[in-house]
Image: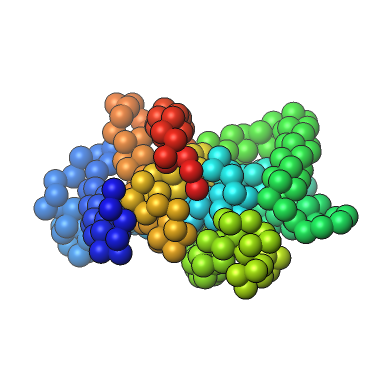
Amino acid sequence: MARSTTARLLWLGVAVAVLALTCLASIAIGAKYIPLGDVIAALFDSGDPNNQVIVGDMRVNRTILGVICGVSLGLAGAVMQALTRNPLADPGILGVNAGASFGIVLGVSLFGAMSLYGYIWFAFAGAAVASVVVYALATVGRGQASPVRLALSGIAFAAVLTGFTQALIIMDSEVLDVYRFWQVGSLAGRNGETIGSVLPFVVVGVVLALGLARALDAMALGDDTASALGANVLLTRLVGVVSVTLLCGAATAAIGPVAFVGLMVPHIVRAFTGPDQRWILPFSLVVAPILMLASDVVGRVVLSTGELQVGVVTTVIGGPVLIALVRRRRMVAT
């Protein structure tokens, strides 16, 4: 496939157009059927008041949050795979999901934070602390925080946090109820306050991640070669961990852990971009929210008696798709 700048810009334009259509579908389609004309009227605060509430207050906020969380998870996955030089890495490998889960359980059990807005900050704090501890563990001893040391530290610390989380859940049924609601991963039930809470962190994370593109390309050649080319390997790795923590921590705190988006999207976009991070990161930023919103729309209509949460749909879709992708050797290569 030709990978000229013109071809990449063309594909990026197509992806942006598809994202716009997916946003419209997310606003227009839901458990309750509303004619398209009434949806448009509700967007301009006219027509049936009930439709204005459903479209304006529920579906629009849900769509905006889906875009924000899709951007966060897709970009965090691309940065994580580049940092660790591991095509199967995802943000959870830094212990972010395990840290967020432990933060929620700790907040509910010790401080009685039973509502979404009560425990969202505990989730974010848990994700941030877990990332800091993992990075500190990876830098202990001789040498720098290599990709292997980061991955092993993240896996080991996540296992420890998961053990403590399970212990707290077993001892308190109320904690179990709250954790089950959050852990499944859903865009439903969130409003503008949730969006406002996580948006500043996501904006900073996006800026940091996009600024790393050239350094990540150099690091793909190995630490020694990257240093010879002028890249600051330690600083790049530190900023990368901070950006992944901000992006994945904010998304996970807001909607719970959603699997496969951060893992699968970078593989998909490499088919259009090749291994150049200056293109992989912007493409991931656009394609990931398409997958997130499309999965959420499917979850709204696939059952006649209710909704499937977006975390369930991405897992059902992501597993077979990822297997098909990794069997194509050309797409696995980073």
As displayed, is residue 91 above or below residue 307? Answer: below
Location of residue 109 by image quarter: top right
- Of all residues, the one furthest to the left in this rendering is 37
Location of residue 159 by image quarter: top right
As displayed, is residue 228 above or below residue 253? Answer: below
Locate residue 113, reporting x and y percent: 67, 50
- Of all residues, the one furthest to the bottom in this rendering is 230
Q: Which residue is drawn at 29% across and 48% down?
A: 1
As displayed, is residue 237 above or below residue 313? Answer: below
Q: How many labels does the image show?
A: 0
Q: Which residue is drawn at 56% across and 63% down?
A: 218
Is residue 87 visible in the rendered structure shown here?
Answer: yes
Q: Which residue is drawn at 32% across and 43% down?
A: 294
Locate residue 205, reporting x and y percent: 55, 65
On screen, residue 56 versus residue 276, left or right, reads left
Q: Which of 280 and 125 is in front in this view?
A: 280
Q: Nearer the viewer, residue 324 or 45?
A: 324
Is residue 67 visible in the rendered structure shown here?
Answer: no
Location of residue 79 by image quarter: bottom right
On screen, residue 199 versus residue 244, left or right, reads left
On screen, residue 204 versus residue 169, left or right, reads left
On screen, residue 94 versus residue 164, left or right, reads left
Q: Which residue is drawn at 59% across and 49% down?
A: 85
Locate residue 20, reporting x and y percent: 25, 57
Q: Which of 105 and 145 is in front in this view?
A: 145
Locate residue 74, reporting x and y percent: 46, 51
- Which colour style is shown? rainbow
